[in-house]
Amino acid sequence: MLRTLINNWWLAALRGIFALVFGAAVFLMKGVAQGFILEPLAFAGIVLLFGFLAVGAGMFTIVAALRSEKKELRSWWLAADGLAASSLGVAIIVLPDLNVVTLAYMMAGWALVIGGLEIVAAVHVRKHLPDEWILALGAARSWAFGLYLLIRRPDEVQSLLRWMGWYAILSAVSMLGLAFRLRRLRRSLNQPMSS
């Protein structure tokens, strides 16, 4: 599993960039969408952007899982992660009349699934990198976000956008941190040993 993550460090970077773009778009649209007419338009735009980014991130993740070494059966979690993200993205794009509460439930389920998969990855990676905490922190973040959406069920666009924006920004920070760490580890493994 560690080899799969190291070889696909770019995937964590790409997902971090997607999350950063989405978080910035949410806060930009949230600031613009203060009127009766603009709020539904901003919400629809954010929902579509999230759907397309989720499909893109999911597809790249599935490709990374398929490219992993054949002997590494543990890359199933990577394929499951990609499938979950892609499925959510497609559902969000094709569902007509998606309202705030339905979107909150869909995102809660997705965050809980992603959090579970991040825990699986963290447990396996920790066997090789004892001080690895980024994946575990990401899992806690995902579960906190998912449980918040399930318990509070935000029914106002502004409230949901605020939580989505902060979740995306925190995801971006942790994914980019993980990507740079994996890239550094890959470089150190590929350097020839000095005699």
Image (tube, rainbow, N blue to C red):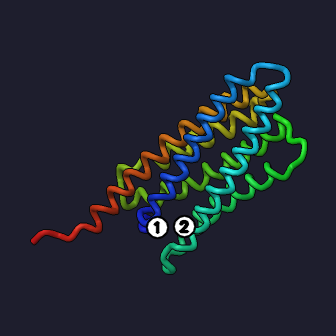
Q: Residue at x 85, y 37 (%)?
A: 99
Q: Residue furthest right?
A: 97
| Left or right: 59, with 105 as reference point | left
Q: Identify the image quadrant of the C terminus.
A: bottom left
Q: CA distance from mark 2 to mark 1?
A: 8 Å
Residue 166 in the image: state x and y as whole percent.
Answer: 59, 32
Instruction: Say above or below: 1 vs 32.
Output: below
| Left or right: 32, with 96 as reference point | left
Secondary structure of residue under mark 2: helix
Quarter assignment of residue 90? bottom right
Q: Earlier in the sequence, mark 2 or mark 1?
A: 1
Q: Which mark is residue 140?
A: none
Q: Residue at x 58, y 43 (%)?
A: 19
Q: Are marks 2 and 1 in contact (CB under 8 Å)?
A: yes
Please name the residue that numbered disc 2 is placed on. 64
Number of numbered discs overlaid on the protein picture: 2
Label 1: few (<14), some (14–19) or many (≥20) C-alpha neighbours in 10 Å: some
Q: Residue furthest top?
A: 35
Label 2: few (<14), some (14–19) or many (≥20) C-alpha neighbours in 10 Å: many
Q: Residue at x 63, y 33 (%)?
A: 165
| Callout 1 amino acid | Thr
Please name the residue that numbered disc 1 is placed on. 4
Secondary structure of residue under mark 1: helix
| Left or right: 8, with 183 as reference point | right
| Callout 2 amino acid | Ala
Residue 168 in the image: state x and y as whole percent.
Answer: 59, 39
